[in-house]
Amino acid sequence: MAADLRELVAYCDGLLDIDAVVDFSPNGLQVEGTHRVQRIVSGVTACQALLDEAVAAEADLVLVHHGYFWKGEDSVLAGMKGRRIATLMGSHMSLVAYHLPLDRHPDVGNNAELARVLGVAPEAGFGELGGTAIGLGGGLGADEDPDDFRRRVEETLSTRALHVSGPQYRIRRVAICSGGAPDLIGEAAAAGHDLFLTGESNERVTHAARELGIHFLAAGHHATERLGVQALGQHLAERFGLRHTFVDIPNPA
């Protein structure tokens, strides 16, 4: 089977409600290729290695979380960016990217998928960014040792997490925001969570966690953002009868 590119993108734009959030890059179609889509290759970031894998797989569409044309980025299509665009256009592959809308989606989003695999029952959004709440708060089935939760994060995501301990010996409520959102720790604490999980850390968040009385886990930007694009790609494959392959380009950050 095959799907029309414009129909596919319009469906994704509506599903992810892309107009609900002010983002740092355009969401949806970024590079237009063939209009007949049969095979999707998905990945976290539209790096050259992912594009090369997509070419080898004879993909029609590359679906990513981190695409191109970020605010403040040089708009000249030369060097690294030029080579990436040339790879897409030379192979007639489309590039479709969803950033914050994919983080926050309640079903196929990064945060929802993290909650699912980690055993956190979603309760409410938190964390104002880009005009709307992008984080997700929820509860564990029972009080849990924070070190046990950290180990589950590391094993489930195949990562190593930085842990700043809070005062609680047991945790119950967990806030999640994938990627680089350490500065949402204040909102996570204010909403009554015992632990905040995100991808990246920074110098000031350690002090904030200690003073706000909340456990903090940074499990890696890439590691916390692998699940949403897989879920979206699989959803599209099932809905439109397409072939979908997720390609993980290793990234320790």
Image: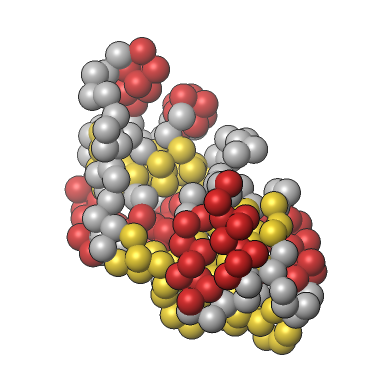
Position of residue 101 measured from the top left corner of the image (x, y, whole percent): 34, 58
Asked if residue 128 can be seen in this view, the reply is yes
Image quadrant containing the C terminus: top right
Q: Residue furthest bottom?
A: 142
Position of residue 32 measured from the top left corner of the image (x, y, whole percent): 23, 34
Could you tell me which residue is drawn at 24 percent across and 55 percent down?
22
Total numbered labels? 0
Q: 137 or 18: which is nearer to us?
A: 137
Q: In the picture provided, is 97 more to the left or to the right than 232?
A: left
Could you tell me which residue is drawn at 58 percent across and 70 percent down?
212
136 lies above or below 123: above
Position of residue 20 measured from the top left corner of the image (x, y, whole percent): 23, 64
Could you tell me which residue is drawn at 27 percent across and 24 percent down?
74
Q: In the picture provided, is 36 more to the left or to the right than 229?
A: left
Q: 133 or 99: which is nearer to us?
A: 133
Rendered image quadrant of residue 88:
top left
55 lies above or below 236: above
Q: Residue furthest top?
A: 79
Asked if residue 223 can be seen in this view, the reply is no
Could you tell me which residue is drawn at 32 percent across and 23 percent down?
85
Q: In the picture provided, is 92 more to the left or to the right than 123?
A: left
